[in-house]
Amino acid sequence: MTTTQPEHRAQAGDFLSRIPFLISSILESTNEAIYRE
């Protein structure tokens, strides 16, 4: 049971590390849409 916790934490950390990239990509797409308008 205890060996599965580090794996879940690792997955959560990997997901959190990807959030800034997702936000930046979303902001770029929205900025392009606003600039086009």
Image: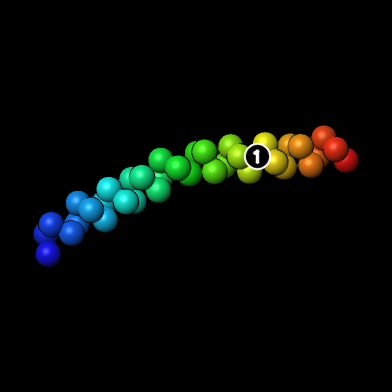
Residue at the far bottom in the pictured view: 1
Left or right position of 5 against 18 = left
Q: Quadrant of residue 36?
A: top right
Q: Residue at x 50, y 39 (%)?
A: 20
Q: Residue at x 26, y 51 (%)?
A: 9
Q: Quadrant of residue 31?
A: top right
Left or right position of 34 against 8 = right
Left or right position of 34 against 9 = right
Q: Is 4 situated above or below 9? A: below
Mark 1 neighbour density, 10 Å: few (under 14) some (14–19) many (20 or more): few
Label 1 SS: helix
The kind of residue tagged 1 is Leu
Q: Residue at x 19, y 51 (%)?
A: 6
Left or right position of 14 against 26 = left
Q: Residue at x 67, y 36 (%)?
A: 28
Q: Position of residue 32 (x, y in %)?
A: 76, 37
Q: Position of residue 8 (x, y in %)?
A: 26, 56
Q: Quadrant of the N terminus?
A: bottom left
Q: Quadrant of the C terminus?
A: top right
Question: Which coloring applies here?
Answer: rainbow
Q: Which residue is mark 1?
A: 27
Total numbered badges shown on the rendered structure = 1
Residue at the far left in the pictured view: 2
Q: Position of residue 25 (x, y in %)?
A: 61, 39
